[in-house]
Image (spheres, rainbow, N blue to C red):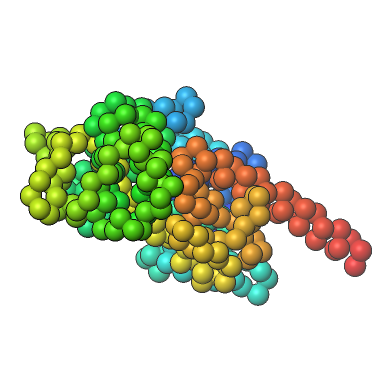
């Protein structure tokens, strides 16, 4: 991968983002013989995690190794991958795109796939950010097997934490929901009954900090000084979708409980002609395997759209 800006000229497709979605899209486009550029800012969402789980044949692979293998594969098909950042994008008079990179240079793109992902804003509890991806986790499907049957805690910052606590009880029967900043009257009676049936303990009081011993989470300390022994804590980060480029292009967004995401069709095509979105730029719950699938669909749709657009233009020229 080129580590410094160096891309110039016109590309049939520019993929913004070099994670699972972006590299999967690039693989399809490279194999379709499209001149393709991937602009990778090098900020994968799963960087704190030690391993990628739930991806068939790649289960347990470190995220950095997964991405390095992906870059090697796409470059084998002639795709250019640069470590840079897209700071602006604008449509030209022909419905194509001028893409500006960090260093001030730019490239021309006939079509775009945006896979810029999202950032996780963690609860402001001392110890949470430092342990995130290790023994502070957010997704039981990603990490539940590795911590199965341990003593789980769930940190509530919204009533949605009840759902998370009930979900993680699939992997451990020792689960405590720390209400933290959520008042008891914010929890529905039905949710309280479900927690009781699932055997989830509910502890009131604000969490002051995590207790760590020998580089391992050992407990959760409340503001009143009491400590509850826990070896795993699940949290629900606030999602901050990186949709700035899509907004600049005028893409229609829809509000969800997890942030605003572009309105797309089944292929990932946004409301802006010629622009697709995939991965966590298109939705909150796009784990690595889903993101790769979304990138594949977007690239296949882009390739087909370019093919028939060019054929139709050639037919029109013959008629004139």
Q: Closest to the observer: 50 or 224?
A: 224
Which residue is located at x 44 percent, y 28 percent?
Answer: 58
Give percent across and percent down for residue 250: 57, 71
Q: On the rendered image, what quadrant is the N terminus found in?
A: top left
Tell me which corner region of the image, top left, top right, bottom left or bottom right, holds residue 66: top left
Q: Residue at x 42, y 67 (%)?
A: 87
Counting labels gives 0
Q: Is residue 91 left or right of residue 312?
A: left
Picture quadrant where residue 94 is located? bottom right
- Examine the rendered structure and indicate whether residue 23 appears above or below residue 180: above
- Residue for point 37% across, 65% down: 103
Q: Residue furthest bottom?
A: 93
Percent position of residue 221, x then y:
13, 46
x and y percent of residue 319 in the render?
92, 63
- Image coordinates of residue 222 in percent, x first then y, are 14, 50
Residue 60 in view of the camera: yes
Image quarter (top left, top right, bottom left or bottom right) of the C terminus? bottom right
Q: Nearer the viewer, residue 62 or 185?
A: 185
From the viewer's side, name the closer residue of 9 and 39. Answer: 39
Q: Is residue 29 visible?
A: no
């Amino acid at each position: 991968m080129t580590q410094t800006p160096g891309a110039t000229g016109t590309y049939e497709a520019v993929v913004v983002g070099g994670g699972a979605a972006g590299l999967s899209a690039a693989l399809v486009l490279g194999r379709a013989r499209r001149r393709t550029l991937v602009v990778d800012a090098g900020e994968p969402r799963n960087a704190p995690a030690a391993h990628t789980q739930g991806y068939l044949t790649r289960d347990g692979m470190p995220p950095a190794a997964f991405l390095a293998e992906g870059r090697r594969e796409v470059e084998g098909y002639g795709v250019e991958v640069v470590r840079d950042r897209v700071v602006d994008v604008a449509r030209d008079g022909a419905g194509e795109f001028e893409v500006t990179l960090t260093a001030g240079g730019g490239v021309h793109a006939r079509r775009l796939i945006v896979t810029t992902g999202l950032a996780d804003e963690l609860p402001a509890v001392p110890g949470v950010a430092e342990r995130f991806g290790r023994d502070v986790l957010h997704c039981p499907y990603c990490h539940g097997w590795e911590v199965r049957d341990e003593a789980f805690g769930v940190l509530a910052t919204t009533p949605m934490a009840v759902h998370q606590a009930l979900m993680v009880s699939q992997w451990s029967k020792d689960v405590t929901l720390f209400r933290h900043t959520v008042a008891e009257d914010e929890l529905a009676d039905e949710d309280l009954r479900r927690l009781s049936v699932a055997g989830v303990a509910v502890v009131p009081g604000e969490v002051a900090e995590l207790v760590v011993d020998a580089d391992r989470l050992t407990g959760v300390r409340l503001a009143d000084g009491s400590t509850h022994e826990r070896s795993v804590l699940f949290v629900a980060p606030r999602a901050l979708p990186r949709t700035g480029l899509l907004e600049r292009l005028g893409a229609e967004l829809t509000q969800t409980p997890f942030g605003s995401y572009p309105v797309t069709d089944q292929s990932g095509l946004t409301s802006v002609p010629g622009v697709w979105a995939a991965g966590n730029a298109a939705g909150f719950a796009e784990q690595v395997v889903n993101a790769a699938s979304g990138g594949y669909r977007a690239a296949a749709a882009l390739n087909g759209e370019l093919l028939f657009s060019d054929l139709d233009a050639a037919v029109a020229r013959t008629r004139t």
